[in-house]
Amino acid sequence: MLKGYMDLMLAVNLPFSDPEKAIKTLQDKAYPHHLAYRGVAVAYRDLDKLEKALEYVDKVLLEVPDNPEVHYLKAQILVAQARDKDNDLSMRKKARENFDMALENSDKMPRRLVAQVFFEQCKNINNIDDGKRPCDPMRDAIRDGLGTWGPTELPLL
């Protein structure tokens, strides 16, 4: 599994490499499937093949529906799709739902990741309602808090 992930990330980020071959290898040989599918979703996201990324992240969610990091990944993909489609508000609202699902389990993620998810959620909501929420200081307060794991209570957006 680890070799498959490494091959995939190298193929996605290095010129003259074949990401499709690395994706196929990960799909065919990696187990458990939800981890392989997550890697494929990340690769397609990074390759800006957002429909394929969404297809694979949905496969992951069928197997692990309560995984906060997968909901975060889906939210990132939906935000990228919204940007590609003239700031499509319906996609941004779907992204918001996935950010919310990720943040519902903030105590299951490292604090710094929670801070990043919260920050991206805040920016997404500002795009939805033309708000002026101070996303940076709210993120910093979460990130700089005590403990390794995310807080159970987050600032209101």
Image (cartoon, rainbow, N blue to C red):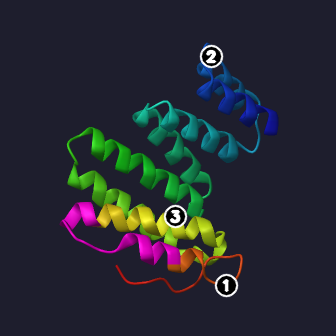
Residue 32 included in the magenta stretch of the image: no
| Residue 97 occupies quadrant | bottom left
Task: Check disc 1 and report its element: helix, strand or loop.
Answer: loop
What's under tag 3, amino acid-wise? Gln
Residue that numbered label 1 is attached to: 146
Q: Is residue 132 left or right of residue 38?
A: left
Q: CA distance from mark 2 to mark 1?
A: 43 Å
Q: Is residue 57 left or right of residue 51?
A: right
Q: Which mark is residue 116?
A: 3
Nearer the observer, 28 or 145: 145
Residue that numbered label 2 is attached to: 18
What's under tag 2, amino acid-wise? Asp
Is residue 1 in view? no
Q: How many marks?
A: 3
Q: Main secondary structure of the magenta part?
A: helix
Dot 1, crowdedness within 10 Å: few (<14), some or many (≥20)?
A: few
Q: Say whether disc 3 or disc 1 marks the residue closer to the N-terminus.
A: 3
Task: Give percent across and percent down for residue 119.
Answer: 44, 66
Task: Give percent across and percent down for residue 26.
Answer: 70, 30
Dot 3, crowdedness within 10 Å: few (<14), some or many (≥20)?
A: some
